[in-house]
Image (cartoon, helix red, strand yellow):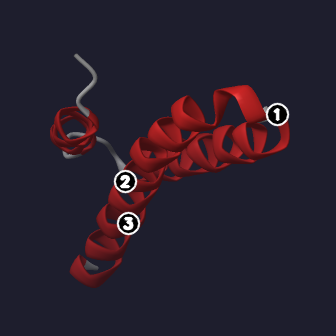
């Protein structure tokens, strides 16, 4: 079963082990994937697109939050 919240929690755990360079690269990659999804969405796949976008937005937020915490710790 599709569980966007579980995916986001798993991802949050994984990125807690990343270096700042890996966080930046992950954020850049996530933003590229989001732009790709936005350009290629079709009407017949709107539900799947919205599910993917929800997960992706949570992941982007996690990267941004982790980078903010890193900057504050400096």
Instruction: List the residue tagged with mark 3.
Output: 67
Instruction: List the residue tagged with mark 1.
Output: 40
**Within 10 angstroms of label 1, few (less than 14), some, or many (20 or more) residues?**
few
- The answer to which of marks 2 and 3 sits earlier in the sequence is 2
38 vs 55, left or right, is right
Which dot marks residue 58? 2
Q: Residue at image x 82%, y 33%?
A: 40
Q: Nearer the viewer, residue 21 or 9?
A: 9
Asked where in the image residue 44 lies, by quadrant, the reply is top right
Secondary structure of the residue carrying tag 3 is helix
Secondary structure of the residue carrying tag 2 is helix
Give the Cα distance between marks 2 and 3. Answer: 14 Å
Give the Cα distance between marks 2 and 1. Answer: 20 Å
32 vs 4, left or right, is right
Answer above or below: position of 6 versus 28. Answer: above
Q: Residue at image x 75%, y 47%?
A: 35
The percent coordinates of residue 45 (x first, y second) are 66, 28
Secondary structure of the residue carrying tag 1 is helix
């Amino acid at each position: 079963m599709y569980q966007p919240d579980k995916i986001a929690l798993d991802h949050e755990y994984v990125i807690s082990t990343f270096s700042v360079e890996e966080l930046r690269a992950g954020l850049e990659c996530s933003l590229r994937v989001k732009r790709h999804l936005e350009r290629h969405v079709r009407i017949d796949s709107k539900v799947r697109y919205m599910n993917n976008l929800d997960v992706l937005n949570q992941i982007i937020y996690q990267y941004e939050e982790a980078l903010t915490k890193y900057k504050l710790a400096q």
